[in-house]
Amino acid sequence: MRPCGTFDERYSQDMAILRIKRHWGLLIGALILLYLFPLFGSYYFISLVNSLCIGIIIVLGLQIVSGYCGQISFGQAAFMAVGAYTSAILTGKVGLSFFLALPISGIVAGLIGLGGGAPSLRIKGFYLAMATIAIHFVVMWLIPHLDITGKTQGLHPPAPQIGSFTFDSDEKIYYIIVTVMLLMTYGARNMVRTRVGRAFVAIRDNDLAAEVMGIELYRYKLLAFFISCFYAGIAGSLWAHWIQVVHPEQFTLLHALNYIGMLIVGGGGSIPGVFFGVIFLRLLDEGVMFAAPLLASIFPWIGIHPAASMSVSVFGIVLIIFLIYEPRGLAHRWEIFKTSYRLYPFSH
Amino acid sequence: MRKILCGVLIFTFLFVTGVLQSNAQKEVTYLSLADYTAAIAGLNVPGDMGTEDYFKELNAKGGVDGVKVKFIGVDTRYDVARGVSAYKRYRAEPKLLVANAIGTPIGKAVGPLATKDKIVQLVPGDGEFQANLGRIFVWGPTYQDAFAATVDWLLADWKKKGKTGMPKLGFISWDSAYGKEPLRGGKEYAEKRGVTLAPPEFFPPGTMDHTVYLSRLAKAEVNYIFVGGVDPTPTNVIRDAHKLGLTKTIQFFCDYWGPTSLGVRLHPEALEGTVIVSYYLRGDDARKHPLSNLWVKYGHGKLEDMNEVYTIGMLWAMTFEAGLKIALKEVGYKKLDGEAMYQAYQKLTGLERAGLQGPCAYSPTSRRGSWEVRFYQVRAGKVTSISDWIKAPDAVSLHKF
């Protein structure tokens, strides 16, 4: 729904993501705030934004393959690992610049991800989920058994560098992570509006009907997996150079489940939904981490560890609540809010 | 509605009182990055219960020279991202002196950050922190040292049984950095002592059935098998070995995270005869220790249900207390920081911790929490001591890290 009084007079207006001056104002304001944040934000919050941005990139990839194309994938953590290790090897062992290693990591993860997409023509739903779980285990078995990956000991990728300037702190690497996140979001937002994006949605809604309309199912499903894994690979590369330790135990199936949880809470088939899901669940997690010691100090009978281990139950409860009461996620709530705001004071 | 309002008011009052109280006193912080809900929760939960109770007891007695200890426990879920995030969240806590990173991957990820912040970090048993001296301290002897002590023990056992030739040793553990750590130096030590090591077997953490791996070891005709993994893993491995009939012909060993009395209670027949190498008291030795009464005092249930790992938690706290005492004496409360604590930890050489563990071995050249190990055996369903404290060999120096 357009903002009240906004009419499209040209094709470019019809295609615009930002339609009115207020949208542009809000975007520019948000970007300024985002880029100035390290100047006034605390170390912890900067680090939190870094982790949120990396999470957003991963879930954007998952949104494309699952939310838009309807292909369930549990392999996102493994493909993130592929990106992280590729980047660590290319920068640490080959001596390539991080800025070259970053896209290569995405491409390598994407190519390996085609393996995940390969069975998608013959199987779907639960069976495809099982196939992607299998890929997760194959990848995560290979990594600690190869010499090039440092086996179980992992690798220590260097901090990104431009000339003599090293991005060796949370504050410095923040600019790289945020910029990449914005570019990836822009890419995803535009892609879902293209012919490719519409083909994905058609496949998700009814693959037989899509095929009858002339959409090559196999090609588009593989493309969705490639893009999704490309995103995971980019996120993995950023993660590796941010944490500077890459270890096989960092990428577990539990992480993959967590990303799917973020998608459910945020809402499938929506780019803002990715932001909502990642931010909501990560902040919930951080909130529990923050509240647990306080709770334990105020109510000592609870004890430290029962209070601290609440986050798992909270995650589970939140997922159940969303699945029952708002299966379309926070993005749907946001749409309802926007509609009522635009119609105000009228009810419809 | 009125009830809800009253509840909110009471909660707010308690919250504000709690925050104000904690801000009013002289306090230092001890951070535990522990896994309370995932792969190594069996170790972390009782461990941190011990630390928390010991600090409660210490604070109730007035703290260390009037300085109270604030214990913060975070559930990392064995997740590196969460561990790192938690560290970053709490690194700015007032007077954060020690971060205990429980779990090998989290220890490795947090290590560089804690070092940068000049905070003392504790890790379970990885030898690389002894090989590369820094601010990271190991709780006890390293994994490889304990493994080497077991090699010595099995050689003596072999001789005692009047067998000729040299025994063959099998190794089975998690397919992870922790699982492979005992062999980084331990393998070299076994070779040095002439013990043949069969190709080691590694399985993913969480594996429920270990028969394939055990069958391969049996095929290799090993005489002894060393089982790694945090309980209940070792208990489950030996349960599977028992099913295969291997416990009749092969002597099983476990590292210091091996079966606790609670694990033994689950599978007493399977675990019968298993030897455990430990640097802390186990079984009745642990339960009879006067400090174990804190378990009952703080309402965790009957003493016979106490997990022995509870005492390790008290050991971390006791070591912290001793370090804090030295640091306070040297720099006073105002100047107290991670650097002062780091210097203090290096002066803890020879510290006695109520006999729960061997004397502390921390020094400018040592990051080992102690050298001594003790052997226990499961006999008639009980974890029974079969040796006195024995100094473990140095296996770390045999490996190139």
Image (cartoon, coloured by chain):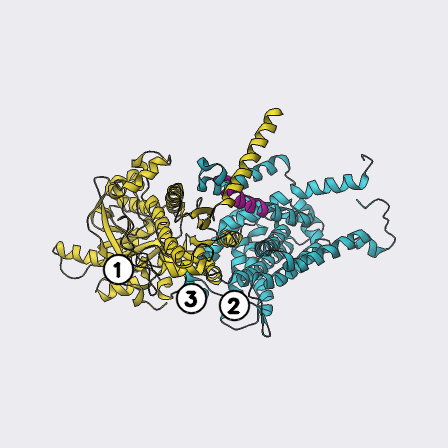
Chain colours: A cyan, B yellow
The verdict on residue A225 being magenta is no
Residue type for callout 2:
Pro
Q: Rounded to the nearest whole Å, what is the CA distance between mark 3 and mark 1? A: 26 Å
Image quarter in which the C terminus of chain A is found = top right
Q: Position of residue B3 (x, y in %)?
A: 59, 25
Residue type for callout 3:
Asp
Q: Rounded to the nearest whole Å, what is the CA distance between mark 3 and mark 2? A: 19 Å
| Image point (30%, 52%), residue name | B255
Q: Which residue is mark 1?
A: B148
Q: Residue furthest top?
A: B2
**Is disc 3 in contact with disc 2, using a CB cutoff of under 8 Å?**
no
Residue B15, quarter of picture? top right
Residue closest to the eye, B71 or B65: B65
Q: Residue furthest left?
A: B162
Same subunit, labels 3 and 1: the answer reads no
Q: Is residue A261 above or below residue B129?
A: above
Q: In the drawing, does residue B361 fall left or right of residue A237?
A: left
Q: Position of residue A62 (x, y in %)?
A: 60, 51
Q: Does residue A17 appear in the picture of this structure?
A: no
Q: Give the label on residue A147, or none.
A: 3
- Chain letter behind tag 1: B
Residue closest to the eye, B359 or B59: B59
Q: In the drawing, does residue A26 fall left or right of residue B377?
A: right
Same subunit, labels 3 and 2: the answer reads yes
